[in-house]
Image (cartoon, rainbow, N blue to C red):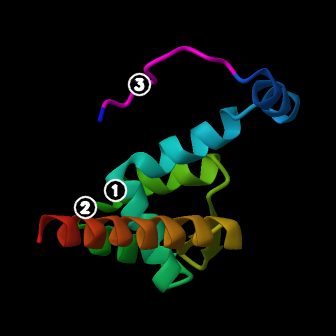
Amino acid sequence: MTEVCDITKVHPEAVDRVQQHMVELDGVSALFKALADETRLKIAYALTIEPEMCVCDIAAVIGSSTATASHHLRYLRERDLAKSERKGKQIYYSLSDDHVRQLVTIANEHAKEGVSVEQNLSS
């Protein structure tokens, strides 16, 4: 089966409905771009497990220097995906809100489902 229609036939009603409700998606694109980096995604996932972690602990989780972890955390914070709080001499990070937690969790569940479907198809 090819992934292209055999004929070209535009359905104007459907196109009009979608165009009436289409919104700018730049912010959504930036959000997914931020989470598309495997290191930043690992950080976000770690913060779904442990809701607040210091930079040193996050560096240990991702196997990097604190400078590298801090760089990725700053990137997430600048895009409103994470927030930080100083406690004494340490900086603690958490996800900015439950929406980010849900996105990471749902994306992981979806990826797992895709793997199990692929395994069933190849069996």
The residue mark sitting in front, 1 or 3, is 3
Q: Is residue 28 magenta?
A: no
Quarter of the picture containing the N terminus is top left
Q: In which quadrant of the rendered view does residue 42 lie?
A: bottom left
Inter-mark Cα distance, 3 to 2: 44 Å
Q: Amino acid at mark 2?
A: Ser
Q: Is residue 78 above or below residue 26?
A: below
Left or right of 89 in this view: 25: right
Looking at the image, which residue is at 25% across and 61% down?
A: 64
Inter-mark Cα distance, 1 to 2: 10 Å
The residue mark sitting in front, 3 or 2, is 3
Q: Nearer the viewer, residue 13 or 45?
A: 13
- Residue pointed to by mark 2: 64
- Residue pointed to by mark 3: 4
Inter-mark Cα distance, 1 to 3: 36 Å
Q: Amino acid at mark 1?
A: Thr
Q: Nearer the viewer, residue 76 or 119?
A: 119
The residue mark sitting in front, 1 or 2, is 1
Left or right of 103 in this view: 6: left
Residue 75 lies, in percent from the top left, at 52, 47
Q: Secondary structure at mark 1?
A: helix
The label number, if any, that marks residue 39 in the structure image = 1
Picture mark count: 3
Q: Nearer the viewer, residue 66 or 51?
A: 51
Left or right of 52 in this view: 17: right
Marks 1 and 2 close (CB-CB < 8 Å): yes
Which residues lie in the magenta part?
A: 2-10
Residue 30 lies, in percent from the top left, at 59, 39
Q: In which quadrant of the rendered view does residue 66 lie?
A: bottom left
Q: Is residue 20 above or below residue 106?
A: above
Q: Is residue 105 above or below residue 65?
A: below
